[in-house]
Image (cartoon, grey):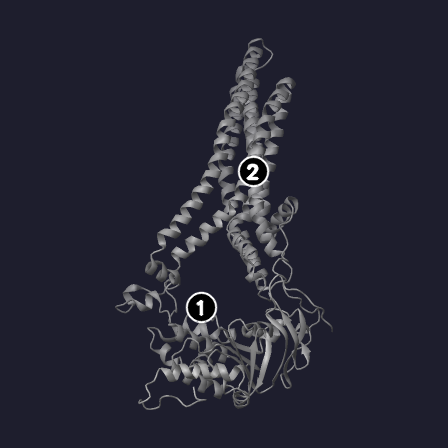
Amino acid sequence: MTHGPREVTGESEPAPAGTGRLAGRALRLAWDASRGVTSAYFLVALAAPALPVLVAWATKGVLDALQAGAPTDELLLGALVLGGLGLLAGWAPQVQQYLRAELNRAAGLRTLELLYRAVGRLQGLVRFETPRFLDRLRLAQQSTHGVPTMVVQTLFGLLGGSLTIVGFLTSLLAINVVMSVAVVLSALPVLVVELALARRRADVMWRTTPAQRREFVYGTYLTDPQAAQEIRLFGFGPFLLGRILADRRGVDAADRRVDRQDLRLQVPLALCSALVAGAGLVWAVLAAQAGRLTIGDVTLFVAAVAGVQQALVAVVQSLAQAHESLLLFGHLDAVLEAPPDLPVAAEPVPVPPLRDGIRFEDVWFRYAPDLPWVLRGVDLVLPAGDSLGVVGMNGAGKSTLVKLLCRFYDPQRGRILWDGVDLRDLDPAELRSRLGAVFQSFVTYDLTAAENIALGRVDAVRDRARVEEAAVLAGVDDVLRTLPRGYDTLLTRTMAGLDGDQDPSDGDADGADVTGVPLSGGQGQRLALARAYLGDSELLILDEPSSGLDAAAEDEIHRSLQHLRAGTTALLISHRLGAIRVADRIVVLDDGVVRETGDHATLMAAEGLYARLFALQARGYRDLLPASEPGGPLPAGRL
């Protein structure tokens, strides 16, 4: 199977779909979440608008019967019907509110599942390093809280409002065609103005989105425990707060201008509606006085005029709300419909056991078409069972090699072979199940110590023996056993107590088991090592595995690494060349190109870039020790 060059870019996610398609997808999402609740909500949305019309007609019937001197039983029956309709009209909003809450829960749960499943389908890192996609993802996360239900609610509201208008207009037509036309014409300016204001509000919301995003980012800094240290040390909290307030004032000013325009325009609109309603009332009273209308007709006419005007305003407001809701739902839909960020073979080749090794053949890579090449024609071989050390200056491309080997990205040119098979022909999930890794930017998760380690192989969550064995290999077992709850101690202060199983009265004097116990950087790195040790990996990738450790801990870690790597294929990346010298082969990367290769002795004898870097680090250690002190200065070639 051949693979042509392909530029990696984060701009491939689709733009939000059109309004009609978004509305259809929102309705389908609600239907999939709960067909029963959606159906009931739809029926109530249809029935509720008819109730005011029926109440108006029932009132007319009772008043006409009363005026005509109808018998008592007929009047009582009409009163009972009117009372029953009134009861239903009063109860319908409560039923709608309950069904809306039920639909919100069902749709919210379904949306949450769909969103994170869609994020999980992204095999690579391209999208997660694209600011535009991250902004869209944040808005999509916000959209899981009620936005799909809001879209359904506004769409059903439009339908219900339209039915109310039709019902009252039919009633008006039965009384006077001319007045019906006058009422509709008086509502047209309201419709035009409200739609214009709705577009203006949507435009303002879109234009102020960057300011709202900045406010969110700065607010996150002010509440982030990791940022709290520097904010308090350097005292720049007021500076960030000033940025937040400036952005909020800008957003408020834009909203205020629209609100004031709305307020000014509502005066002539209200005057126009009042004049039409007043003129209609005068006509109805005069017609009743002349005997052309009954008292019930007058009541129905008044109710119909008010009902049409109110329903038209409600419909326009629903249109505005639907526009805003669909705008937010569009970000969620764009994430859900995002195409794969890495091509996956329709019929992937089973990942073979690593018996030959891994080969990079003329690999070129850059993170975007407008960025420089990070790797330029890299050729290297990692034989199975051997260890390969990769060294180089910052920016040489060392960590990029790791990302390509884990297939978080694909090279634009060249290929990477696993026992002769191109990584692009393998299933990424199956490939990664054969890897164990410690990344330079490792993470200590807001979970217990045991769970943090078990994430290396999730099936080990309930296998404490495997977890503890990995912790011993990583040299972190003693640390974890001294925690207040041992391996069951939460390694965070953020999540502690949320399960309701930690009571301050049960804790130690310092409340450590209540608030959680964060690990130090070096301890967290050992924990990450334990996570990598947990699986029986065919390839162990260690990207700066000892950068957060002191000298003694580093020596202990590398002794355990040598034991662990026996018979295991390993890729070692480190700035500390003393950690690399034990590798079977060493590759020196410089500006994305392999400059030197060989074992430690060969490279030192060549007196090239590796030898110069090693001498620089060794000199730094020698300079720290007085000449008279035992063991110093260190001999050349020792680190």
Residue 613, relative to residue 412: is it above or below? below
Q: What residue type is labelled 1?
A: Tyr
Residue 353 placement, left or right of 149: right
The quadrant the N terminus occupies is: bottom right
Q: What residue type is labelled 2?
A: Ala
Asked whether the beta carbons under mark 2 and mark 1 sit within 8 Å of each other, the answer is no
Q: How many marks?
A: 2
Residue 578 placement, left or right of 337: left
Please tell me in which quadrant of the rendered image residue 376 appears: bottom right
Residue under the point 57% across and 65% down: 125
Q: Is mark 2 on a helix, strand or loop?
A: helix
Residue 101, relative to residue 506: is it above or below? above
Residue under the point 50% across and 84% down: 611
Label of residue 320 in the image: 2
Please tell me in which quadrant of the rendered image residue 629 appears: bottom left
| Among the two numbered marks 2 and 1 on one chain, the one whose residue lies closer to the N terminus | 2
Crowd rating for badge 1 (residues with CA inside 10 Å; few <14, some 14–19, many 20+): some
Visible in this render: residue 289?
Answer: yes
Q: Position of residue 491 (x, y in %)?
A: 39, 69
Visible in this render: residue 69?
Answer: no
Q: Which of 241 and 564 is in front in this view?
A: 241
Q: Nearer the viewer, residue 289 or 597?
A: 597
Q: What element carries label 1?
A: loop
Residue annotated with mark 1 = 445
